[in-house]
Image (cartoon, rainbow, N blue to C red):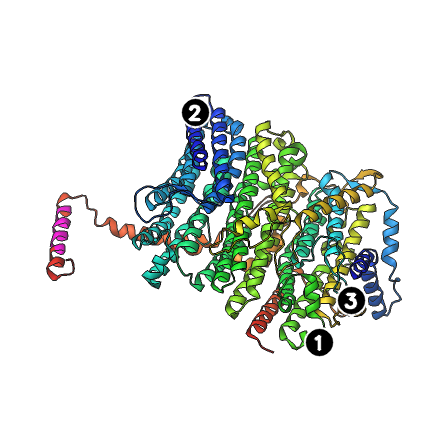
Amino acid sequence: MTAAIALAGVTGLALGGMIAAWPGRVSLGLATQAAGTALLGLGGAIVLIGPHAVGAGFRSGIAPALGLDPLSGFFLLVLAVTAVPALIFAGPYVRAGPSPRAVGALTAAFLLALVGLLGARDITTFLGFWELMTLVPAAAIIVARRDSPVRAAVFAYLAITHLGGAGVWVALLTLAHHGAIGDPAALARAGTGAQTLVAVSALIGFGTKAGLVPLHSWLPRAHPVAPAHLSALMSGVMIKVALYGLIRVEFQWLGATPRWLGIALLAIGLCSALGGVLWALVQHDLKRLLAFHSIENVGIIALGLGASLLFARAGMREWAAIAFAAALLHVANHAIFKALLFLGAGAFEREVGALDLDRLGGLLRRMPWTGGAFLLGAMSIAGLPPLNGFASEWLTLQSLLHVALQGPVWVALAGAVALAGLAATAALALMCFVKVVGLVLLGPPRRPECAVAVDPPAAMRVGMGALAALCVAIGAVPGLVVPTLAALAPGASGDVLALHAGLQVPGTGSLPALGLALALVALVALLFRARGTRHAAPAPSWASGQALTPALSWTSAGFTKPLRIVLEAVLRPTRELEVVEEHGLVQRIAYSNEVHPLADKLLYEPAIRAGLRGAALARRLQTGNVRTYAFYLLMLVIALLALVRTGVLA
Amino acid sequence: MSSVAAAALQLGGVAIAPLAPGTIQTLKARLQGRRGASPLQPYRVLRRLWGKSTVDPEGAGLSYRLAPAIAAASLLLAFALVPLGGRSGGWGLGNDALVFVGLLALARFAVAVGAWDPGNGFALMGAARDVTLAVFGEALLILALLLAALPAHSTDLIAMTDAAGGWAAWSHTAHWCGAFAFALAVLVETGRQPIDNPDTHLELTMIHEGPLLEYAGRDLAYLSWVAAARHWLILTLAAELFLPHPRGFLGGLAALGGGLVAACLLLAVTETTQAKMRILRVPSLLGVGCLVALAGVVFSIAGGP
């Protein structure tokens, strides 16, 4: 039954892709894809709630095998929940964009690759879809945008994810070699050497694709240049599927997890969370800013996963499951609100052109539907009650706090540092989205296009509205989701948490989210009413006696200035001020302010330099003369013969 | 029975919260050799503001108008979370310390977003500083709450109050570290010297007062009450988690009253003796607080004295 639903879904998706490639049938194709994805999500939900697996189980062989278990089902559900609204949004969006047919067809291919990866039960299928998942969005970006900076971004994306992604091959092939896929005991037998190799290479491989610092550099390049619905899918789903791989390897197949792995995940998660949000704060472009926030949120998820590993190691099964549920809930929440924000950004871009933060403004008034949904998404990602982002951040904070309540002392200290870091991350995210909301949605329009923008067609509004409704719904009743997620944790025994609307977690004061939400709405309404309707005539805003002209309006850089000064040592901003004077009068002032990512300077630039130097050396071998190559071959044969003779090669 | 009494007291707290800043101002004036206004002055201000009509700045939209109501509503909810004398009314809203922090963040978000709407430069300057300091302040507050949660093994504020009762807590170094960290967090959250000066009327030095600059009438009354409520709630937490008090409802309440007065006096003394620091030096001060709190975690887990 479930298998039939899933197969129908895949068929619908493939059919939708083919229809979209047909001239003039893009909308129909995308609608078919949405229907297929919805069926797949239904299948995922049945497997998740069942909970029972369908199809094949995991195996170490290379014969292709497909199947679904509850963890795959959960990620499939997240995919559907994000992708269906994105596809509904994409109908009018793609039709008006460049190369609609190709983009429509590639969207289906991308979704199929993601679904295939979630359903893969052997390494051949897994690695095949893994590579497709990287390549298909690259193709879609190149089809949609042809300028050279975009090509450079796509090249960086492919280069970094392929180099880092080699870790996935190493991890999976080692696992398959020991017959350990789907059999945790097998790797435990193989010894700690193999375990460490698998753990580290999986962390690098999947971590690169998930956008964890320091291998994140491709993400803020590639995500912003894709069409909006693909950005939503890349940030919402693709990086989560990489986390799915990470969970499979580190939680299920590794056998005994070493303690350093939990601490390492906390450290990487903290660097990603803080680094992501800090660099997001200094971005000038909305979509780039959102891409950096994906790094932040993946970091928060990694914090939850690290806490779960540490609890499991300490034998605290209950909290291991709660921390695991916190991570999975944040996977779902981030998929939802990040997709919403990217779709909103796409709608703004369609109306007003470029998304330079300092040149937007006033869009909430002009585009109330898009702006309202975007505002809800911004409040969710800033982790504000009573929305969904708060529920998962609260659960993650509680997990870290309880790590800090445990011994031994180093683990407790790591937990406390991560806790403080996550609190700071939440406050930074709040600052960032205060800025975004202020610059994009509020204030006067800072460009003529913003003054005449209007809400997009109904389908696009429905897509965003559905995601915004999910933000509110999960925020109000997170307790209906979390017990199911906690049961997915490895070694979770039965019902860890009882089913409530709110989150009733032992060792906390509980989060009765529904009550909080209702009370908050009621009180706001009451107080707003009590505010009365007596208004004097509007007065001009106070600007020390001068008129408030557009030149006085605040910029993105202005709002983050205190933080940039405080964190100068970390952010290392460069500042250029050029004053042109003629005849003693200032004619023109040029000011620019840039913050260059630290990882680029410390990691990528040296790596690129070393790579180029290595290539220059290797180039000397390439003379172009056929006799030289014959000489190389001869030397190779002699060397091999010598090795066989000495017994090194049997 | 005690839960009904606690509920009544929590509601009473909503009404007497303005006494906290009023008392601090009076004590401060006396310490400085002035007669000063009576502790009831904030009520007079609120009454005066309530009777006035609102003046919206040009270009202000719904987010500007809603901001005071949202801030006041989230602080009202926070009253239900904070127990008094170790008891809380049956509001069905839980008593979690981290939810409390979340509600404070919601109020901060609403006010800062409201500052963007009319685009007043001074309001935005204050909002930018407020959210910047909150980055360090929130980390500090959560670490201090972690130290208070250590003996109770829970973030339930009722359990935390109980565990901090009696004299046993004072024999742990961690408790002293926590008290130091929380004292700094109190300064940030209440916006008092040396971090912020609530009496300032110079726009360039405002932090918390900045975003309030354009508001008038009932909106300003809400926001003034919000500032008073922050004083009340954070001082209550300080008294219940880090000042000596007996276990039990009535004893706890009596100790809470004494603790609140003592905390107000301490704040007045600090304000009198300390000049406002340069705003960019504040994060280092808060960083010291975080380090002390982390040291407290180490002491506590390592089982030291």
Count residues near mark 2 (Cα–Cα under 10 Å), then give few for <14, some for 14-19, many for 20+: many
According to the image, label 2 marks what residue? A19
Q: Secondary structure at mark 3?
A: helix
**Amino acid residing under circle 1:** Trp
**Amino acid residing under circle 3:** Phe
Give the Cα distance between marks 2 and 3.
71 Å
Q: Which of the two labelled residues, at mark 3 and mark 1, occupies the earlier sequence position?
A: 1
Residue at figure coordinates x 64%, y 75% from the top left = B172
User: Residue A152: within the magenta?
Assistant: no
* Quadrant in which the N terminus of chain B is drawn: bottom right
User: Residue A633: within the magenta?
Assistant: yes
According to the image, label 1 marks what residue? B167
Q: Is residue B185 visible to us here? A: yes
Instruction: Using the image, tell me which numbered label, if any, was put on residue B249.
Output: 3
Residue A484: x percent and y percent? 54, 48
Tag 2 and tag 3, C-beta contact below 8 Å: no
Q: Classify residue A444 by image quadrant.
A: top right
Give the Cα distance between marks 3 and 1.
17 Å
Tag 1 and tag 2, C-beta contact below 8 Å: no
Residue at figure coordinates x 52%, y 62% from the top left = A316
Q: Nearer the viewer, residue B267 or B122?
A: B267
Host chain of mark 2: A
